Image (cartoon, rainbow, N blue to C red):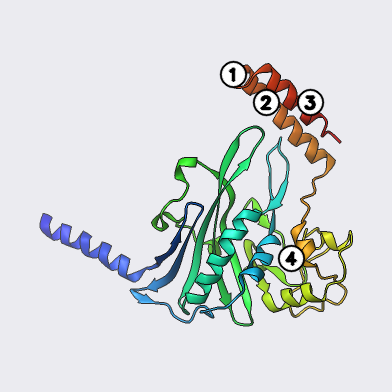
Amino acid sequence: MKRFLIVMVVSAVFLTACAGSRWVRTPVVKDRNFVIALEHREEKGAVVTGAYTHPYEVASEDLGMLMRGLTYVERGGLLTGEKTGHVFQAEEIDRLAPALAGALNVADGSQRIRFTSYKREKALIFYVSRETEGVVFAESGNHLNIAFSRINSEIDPDSVNDFYEDFSRMDPLDIRSADTVLNPIHTFGWRKQLDSGNDAPMWITVDIDAMKQAVASAPAVNSNVSRGLDSSNDVPAVKPDVPAASVVPPTAAAMETLPAALSDDQIKEDIKSKLKYLKELLDEGLISEKDYDAKKSELLEKIP
């Protein structure tokens, strides 16, 4: 009887695994700063084909231009307030864009590209390690999709450069709500609309042809255009089926200088939080009185 029960349990586990779906990943690049893998979905043991228009050719320069235009808003706490920023740093783009473009060019119709990028950023005093993870894939109509499961999430430095097997199990396309929200890129980039009618928070679709046309035909940079990709609320994203004649397309130069504007109140709250943290470091003996006074003066000068 006991043997029979064991056989039944093992059979049930096996049947459940076969009946479900899973992502199978093939490593492409594993660098100290990023990891890239091709992944395909299997349903009941069979590969799901024809999901993407791959292989897909895109110049690494065009992909880099798109990555420079990606910004986000992160909901803050009581002290920190709302934070805005760029998804990728310049050095991240330089190393990641060619690798992603190459992966898109070798993927087949069943595979999308999964990536994790690592960076170090200077915080108040020390450096912190951060991780950005997501997927990239192309659809018909020359639409390129980038969906994220993490954007600039702080991580333990020892976990940097995990192998592809350790990718997050979360599917970025399944995220329905998040504290971090991507900004649309008006005229050619918009957040993906979900079946519920709401926009996905961390999934953006870009019309690559429209992006290149907008950049090629843009007038000289001015103060208004420099805000073009800042995705402020007064300039909404325009999908391809919506006339965009009244929207000024951004230039390549504008994409390089995306301001992350904060209100005066947000700046004050941010400074207050940093001053409190600085005092804690002093009280714990982690910094000297001289370092404390110097950093305190620097922060106080930034109060609007």
Q: CA distance from mark 2 to mark 3?
A: 12 Å
Tell me which label, 4 or 3, sits earlier in the chain. Answer: 4
Check disc 1 and report the residue beneath it. 284
Q: CA distance from mark 4 to mark 3?
A: 38 Å
Secondary structure beneath disc 3? helix
Q: CA distance from mark 1 to mark 3?
A: 20 Å
Whole-percent x, y for residue 156 in the image: 49, 40
Check disc 2 and report the residue beneath it. 278
Whole-percent x, y for residue 50 in the image: 48, 82
- On residue 185, the disc is 4
Q: CA distance from mark 1 to mark 2?
A: 10 Å
Check disc 3 and report the residue beneath it. 297
Amino acid type assigned to the residue bearing label 4 in the image:
Ile
Tell me which label, 2 or 3, sits earlier in the chain. Answer: 2
From the image, which quarter does the N terminus lie in? Answer: bottom left
Establish if 47 lies above or below 166. below
Mark 1 surroundings: few (<14), some (14-19) or many (≥20) residues within 10 A: few
